[in-house]
Image (cartoon, grey):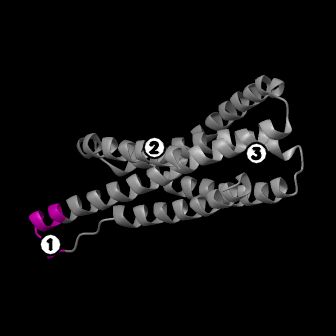
Amino acid sequence: MDTYSHLGVIVVITHFSRKSIQVTLENSQITKSHSDTFSSVQTKVVKRQNLTTLSLTIFYLVFVSSVVEIKSVSHSLFLSFHPFTQLPYLYILVALFISAATFALARPLTHRNPIFLLQVALLFSLFGYFGFFILVSAQISWSYPLLYIACELYPTVINVLFWALVGSLFDSQTAKRSFGIIGAGGMAGATVSGIL
């Protein structure tokens, strides 16, 4: 599979990741009717938490595997069309963009629901990568450094928003059980993507 096909696959993965987050939000909303007993409500809560953990684990698996793919693609495209001596400048730009993005996320995370911000970020990245697919297909030379920066920025922003969402969905007791499972999903995604 060539690098252009990989970029197309990444656009599709980003779209399905956004859908997975919507399912997670639906699973995390619990309503109680007056006829429910305490034990049946508790059972429903545990089932919902397990479904939420499973949804988040699947999302994180897909997310991490797509990060491995997009970084491989962006790095190889950049190095195919630009000399490696430009990498130090690119590293500095990436650090500046990530610092700015992290700083910019701090305020919205205090006032907005993390699920909303994550969905907006996934939607933005979906259209952004589709735009990069067009630019890279046209072999426009300045698109490769921009793609490199975007592919470094994307995982950072999505990771911050994802873990903010995860932190808001679980209490401390459930978090102890769920965070390890979700993190294992990410490791599995990196392993699978690395093998492919």
Which comes before the other along the chain, label 1 or label 3?
Answer: 1
Q: Nearer the viewer, residue 196 or 84?
A: 196
Which comes before the other along the chain, label 3 or label 2?
Answer: 3
Q: Place residue 71 in its image quadrant.
A: top right
Point 38% across, 52% down: residue: 57
Q: Is residue 52 above or below residue 163?
A: below
Q: Nearer the viewer, residue 1 or 53?
A: 1
Point 71% across, 60% down: residue: 127
Magenta span of residues: 34-43
Q: Amino acid at mark 3?
A: Leu
* SS state under label 3: helix
3 vs 2, front mark = 2
Q: Would residue 124 be seen by someone viewing this image from the given angle?
A: no
Q: Amino acid at mark 2?
A: Thr
Q: Residues within 10 Å of mark 3 (few under 14, many from 20)?
A: many
Q: Residues within 10 Å of mark 2 (few under 14, many from 20)?
A: some
Q: Which residue is mark 2?
A: 191
Q: Residue furthest bottom?
A: 35
- Characterize the magenta stretch by its predominant secondary structure: helix
Q: Position of residue 31 (x, y in %)?
A: 28, 69
Q: Position of residue 69 (x, y in %)?
A: 60, 47
- The stretch drawn in magenta includes residue 36: yes
Q: Amino acid at mark 1?
A: Asp
Tell me how far mark 1 sits from mark 3, CA to CA: 52 Å
Q: Which residue is mark 3?
A: 147
- The stretch drawn in magenta includes residue 114: no
* SS state under label 2: helix
Q: Which residue is mark 1?
A: 36
